[in-house]
Image (cartoon, rainbow, N blue to C red):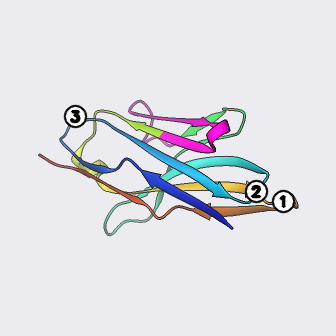
Amino acid sequence: QVQLVESGGGLVQPGGSLRLSCAASGSFVRVNVMGWYRQAPGKQRELLATITSGGSTNYAESAKGRFSISRDNAKNTVYLSTNSLKPEDTAVYYCNAEVADNWYRNYDYWGQGTQVTVSS
């Protein structure tokens, strides 16, 4: 079984920054693509950014310029640095990862989510 555990969310003032972390643990041989999504109240979950094991990144338009995704393969951890936060960035932020099990079968996993609230 694989677990994704997020951390780093919280309450921040407009213009502030947060760094979210997501660590994968369990029984697997490799973590492939990792990504961050968010879901605001009453809205659909949206993709923010993805990063491959080789470090190639992809960003949604809403994340370009203010958010940065990175990962530490040795720790099976992905990060999302968020800057110049706005009230409309308030949402639950979810980590996603494609993980290869011990038989090299790929499965998709989600974290439990971490709340980010941007408010003065």
Q: CA distance from mark 2 to mark 1?
A: 5 Å
Q: Is residue 112 magenta?
A: no
Query: What SS does tag 2 mark?
Result: loop
Q: Which residue is mark 3?
A: 15
Residues under numbered marks 2 and 1 in contact, where contact means CB atoms less than 8 Å apart: yes
Height in image: 86 above or below 94? above
Query: What SS does tag 3 mark?
Result: loop
Q: Which residues are magenta?
A: 60-79
In the rendered structure, which disc, 3 or 2, sits on the residue that comes first in sequence?
3
Q: Which mark is residue 102?
A: 1
Q: Amino acid at mark 2?
A: Phe
Q: Residue at x 62, y 48 (%)?
A: 34
Q: CA distance from mark 3 to mark 2?
A: 39 Å
57 or 19: which is nearer to us? 19
Query: What SS does tag 1 mark?
Result: loop
Query: Which residue is the extreme one toward the right?
Result: 103
Q: Which residue is mark 2?
A: 28
Q: Amino acid at mark 3?
A: Gly
